[in-house]
Amino acid sequence: MSQARRIWDLASLGVKGDKVAEVPVGGVDFAASSFIAPWDIKVVYTFGTKENPTQHNQNAPEDKRIVMPPYEVREGGIWYWLTYNTLPEAVAAQDLLDPSDDKIKPSAQWHIETHAAEVLNNGDLEALANAFGVVMDFDVPIKGLAGSENFEAVHRHEYQLLSLPYAVQAAALAMGYIEKEIFHAEELTAEGADVDGWTEQQYIDYVGDPKGTDIWQSTLGERRRALWLALGEENVKAYTCIGTMTPNGKSEAKTNTVSAQLDECLRFVLGIERESRVYGRLLMVPDPRPKATYGPEHKRLSVACLSEIFGPELPEVRELAASVGAEEIAERGGNKAASHPQLPENWTGAHDLFVAELRKAGRDKPAPVIVAEVYADSVELLAEWWQYMDDNNLWSE
């Protein structure tokens, strides 16, 4: 990131303080490999249960009902996956749904999300939403450093050697702690890169042997070590949070590093006491694991990585991020053409989705409420759409 993009100070960045699912698919039906948007970033806790949580609450006495999670309950086969913002909330819900002693406890996920309508370097919202959903949310499993043949080690590199160092570096660049990129995964992200033909040994050389504990001799391990050293930390294994949450939700936690710079970066990555979303670039990095594919065509899965930070959710930062996004859209040939009233800025190229959102919001709500609910730019623009919806009988499907 160039120094010209650092238009905020350390305090405004918020560094003073703040679903088990497969790794998200990227670049399959949608050409862009990175997304500039205001991102909500945090650590969440997910567990699976065979007990339908909705039916449980319908049948259970009041004192045995769970607090439903703030995220969508995801279903997979006979399982229901519930995600909570804190570990105590997840444990409390799991104990009510499954009182047995042999259950697998909630696991930590690095969670990052935005609304598709808020992506600033996309010229076709319809295609974006079809590929990733109206709410774009990605989870990366936070696995420890131990090696074995189980799920923990097989997925270890996703967070430890991709998402975490990418995000730490983005924070370090934004805070001015380093002046140029140290960590990268060009073998995966460069134009023409293709890991489908990698051998097992190439994979091991790149991210380490899942059966072993020493991943630091690997290509990405060495790059993470170099980044940690640049931030003043000799212990490349330092990354965890120690401490507790106070009753009001504020964290008294610190990370287990002796480096003040790395501590600030890790606190940012973990969402500790950061009160606003952050404008940044989410990069979808192909997963180098040989079996990280899906479907009959064996398409490769991707790992969500925050590779660049523009700044906190402030008007001047949004203007900067939007200008960069507009340049990238222009380079790709501009926005999808439209034959209707001007779409709000965040809905460029997404006529059908915007109409559906207006229809869902309802015709009779006050205009300012609708503006807020559907990310419209102004009441005046909304009036044009009201007329358009009336003239074309679009209020009902």
Image (cartoon, rainbow, N blue to C red):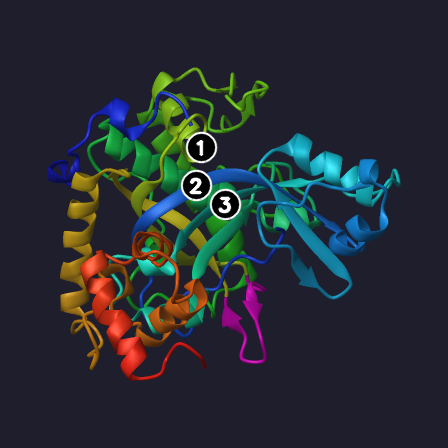
372, 184: nearer the viewer: 372
Using residue 92 as the reference point, say whether residue 216 is left or right of it: left
Disc 2 and disc 3 in contact, CB within 8 angstroms: yes
**For the magenta stretch, what is the residue range?**
290-300
Occupied quadrant, residue 230: top left
Q: Which residue is mark 2?
A: 41
* Kind of residue at badge 2: Ile
Q: Report crowding for label 2: few under 14, some 14 to 19, many 20 or more residues within 10 A (C-alpha).
A: many
Where in the figure is residue 181, as x and y percent of width and height?
25, 40
Q: Which residue lies at the image location 31% right of the left edge and 55% below the top edge? A: 118
Q: Is residue 53 above or below residue 329?
A: above
Callouts 1 and 2 close, C-beta under 8 Å: yes
Q: Which residue is mark 3?
A: 111
Q: Is residue 4 left or right of residue 160?
A: left
Q: In the rendered view, would you say 114 is above or below 269?
A: below
Rounded to the nearest angstrom, the CA distance separating label 1 from label 3 is 10 Å
User: Which of disc 3 and disc 1 is earlier in sequence?
Assistant: 3
**Magenta stretch: helix, strand or loop mostly:** loop
